[in-house]
Image (cartoon, rainbow, N blue to C red):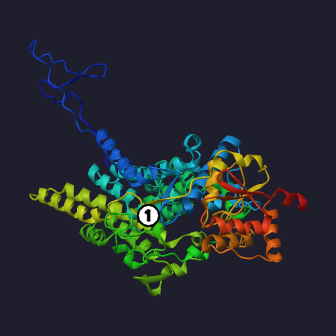
Amino acid sequence: MTSAETRVDSPPDADAPTGSPRVTDAGRISDADPDREPGRPAARRRWRWTPRRQDLAVHGVFLLAAVWVTSRIWADPAGRVATLYSSDPAQVQFFLAHSVRVVLHGEFPFYTEQFNYPDGVNLMANTAILALGIPMVPVTLLFGPAVSFVALVTFGLAGTAAAWYHVLSRHVVRTRLAAAVGGWFCGFSPAMLAHANWHPNIISQFLLPFVVWRVLVLTRSTRPVRDGALLALLVTAQAFINEEILLFTALACGVFLAAGLAQRPALWASAWRPLGTGLAVCAALAGALLAYPLWVQFAGPMAYHGLSDTVRDYGNDIAAFFAPGSATLGGNERANVNLAPNYSEENAFFGWSLSLLAVGIVVWLRREVVVRALAVTGLCFAVLSLGERVSWWDRDLVTGPWELLVRLPLLDAVVPTRFGLITTVVIGVLLALAVERAWSLRTAERRTVRTLAVAGLVAALLPIAPMPLQVTTRPAVPRFITADRWREYVGPDQTLVSVPPPSMGNTHAMRWAASTNLDFKIPGGYFLAPRNGVTGDPGRFGGRPSGIGELLEEVATTGRTPKLDDRQRRRCLDELRHWRAAIVVLPLDQQNAEPLRRTVEQLVGPGRQELDVWLWDVRTLNERSA
């Protein structure tokens, strides 16, 4: 990609027609005209659609679109969540509350015991979004983590689109319309919409265009040390948003540069020295800044190696590339059910029209080195996104190339379906280039060509136009928590145990704790940790297996009250002691609350109702243990 030429405007007074505004010595525009007859009104200054106003208009459209997408959550941030899955928002809200403790109380940022007590959680290995959470601390304190969550989603979508628009309009294309089309797709693609309800860390890609730009700048830099240092700062910041997306960016840049240099080997002679110097400076500086956090992530307490088997083989179905995303105008949740691992991982779903248009653009502009390099990059990662088993409409066909890479260091922590996010960006850049070329044609049929280009864009993008995210209501945080009644029971080194205990499928207690800025500890939760609780083990979702957790989860699901024997009681009581439980809390509106109450009473005796919860004070268990 070549840098856009600097635009040099002519002096304001140059060749100005009689009667036009002139620039005064103070730099202000004056309507005074020495040739104007006395008493004749001054000519009204014409309003101009300046580049700055164009930029503001585009950014405004992006922000309005992001508000439109998240509008149903904004209606009730604390009470609404994604229709089909609610664990990730609760986890993110917990991390946002952790950022408050980091800022206000100086708490260690990379590890916490506020959930999964007493083992704790390695936050560097769990994407604690510190680079997002710390700037949002004022919002979290004033309005709560639920509002911070939806604000991050909104600004993640709009900010990503705006960032790509800025880089494309300044360094790739000259036509702002072309940059706006490319930025729109990068910010509001079906993949971004799929992650919007769950993963603000994934959709917050506003640093990535600048990372890519700075990498390309290094290939022709005259000051590689400075440029390498700037790149290192961007890399460090992105590492505290999402490391997986940073890894994807590095891989995509590597493939793109290799594809470009393979076509023009002569460029390597002038590019290798500044590129090598800049990347070395970047690696040294970013490595120094991230050395300790990365040590905590890979060797610190509760570090794990490799993802859980649950998500390791997540891959796209080939048919997913030709279907519209569920969160789009033409989407169909039921039709997509077997084409993606779940609705939060719809990382392709471009639709037939856009897929054909992307291929058509590559064929049309195939003579351009940049287009061919983009095509290689997009196709490479589209194939890798298919995972270990390539499938068509949920039928396995062959073993995919990802099978050869899945056990490599760093790649063993990648969810393969998300490679589709790279293909998404490639298509966005191709769209920008195609619009630019169509608008720059100098032919007699220029108007016809532009009309056809607009029609093609509408046909390709309308079926995948963003729609408001589908949401459902979730239980409110109990008044027992919001009224601080729990403070009468729970000490600094004790836990509040919800019924059922926190787990991947039950994250309500994480929201309770987040609403208090994590002033009390909880056992369990939703996170990634070593499978057996030993640092270095393969990862799994949640902490050590819990007998009382499995028991109460089954009761909550089935509504059947089991009859417990002495062995089961002793095991459950031992777990409460291990957690240093102070109170056990069951909301009155919990599903199957009555069977759950009877089950807990078999363990610790009768409870009492306080405000909107059933409460069991179990502090005496720890006293007897001591």
Q: Amino acid at mark 1?
A: Ala
Instruction: Tell me the quadrant of the picture where the N terminus can be found.
Output: bottom left
Residue 165 in the image: x percent, y percent? 36, 51
Count the marks: how many?
Answer: 1
Instruction: Tell me the quadrant of the picture where the C terminus can be found.
Output: bottom right
Circle 1: is it few (<14), some (14-19), or many (20+) Cα within 10 Å?
Answer: many
Residue 231 in the image: x percent, y percent? 52, 51
Residue 295 at least partly seen: no
Q: Residue furthest top?
A: 38
Residue drawn 24% across and 65% down? Answer: 459
Camera-nearest residue between 596 and 237: 596
Residue 458 at least partly seen: yes
Callout 1: SS: helix
Q: Quadrant of residue 349?
A: bottom left
Residue drawn 12% across and 59% down? Answer: 448
Residue 427 in the image: x percent, y percent? 35, 64
Residue drawn 26% across and 20% down? Answer: 24
Tell me the residue that label 1 is attached to: 194
Q: Residue furthest bottom?
A: 397
144 relative to 125, above or below: above
Residue 596 in the image: x percent, y percent? 68, 67
